[in-house]
Amino acid sequence: MDPDLMALLVCPACRGPVQEQDSVIVCQSCGKQYPVREGIPVMLVEEAS
Ligand SMILES: [Zn+2]
């Protein structure tokens, strides 16, 4: 994923930093996982697992 895009992403639940891990985005603060669909991270609390 584009590093510039990653730098802009924050967890919508806690505003914590996130990191790409395999095919999901993982919040480093609260541990929520957000799916990536067709290369686009879905940063929605409702979609988190
Ligand atoms: Zn979080």
Image (cartoon, rainbow, N blue to C red):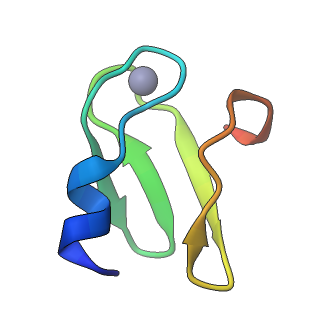
Residue at horizontal 54 percent and vertical 44 percent from the top? 33
Q: In this view of the protein, which residue sits in the foreground, 36 or 5?
A: 5
Residue 2 lies, with reference to residue 9, above or below; the image says below
**Percent position of residue 26, x then y:** 40, 47
Q: Position of residue 46 (x, y in %)?
A: 80, 31
- Residue 36 in the image: above or below residue 45: below
Q: Is residue 19 visible?
A: yes
Based on the displayed image, in which of its 4 quarters is residue 7 positioned? bottom left
- Quarter of the picture for ligand 1? top left
Classify the position of the N terminus by image quarter: bottom left
Foreground pick, 48 / 15: 15
Camera-side residue: 26 or 39?
Answer: 39
Q: Residue furthest right?
A: 46
Left or right, 48 with respect to 40, comes to: right
40 displayed left or right of 47: left
Horizontal and vertical percent position of residue 14? 42, 14
User: Which residue does the image show at 41% across and 30% down from the upper left?
Assistant: 31
Give coordinates of residue 16: x percent, y percent. 29, 24
Residue occupying the point 59% across, 45% down: 43
> Is residue 49 at all visible to an observer of this figure?
no
* Image quarter hosting the C terminus: top right
**For the image shown, how many numbered marks are present on the structure?**
0
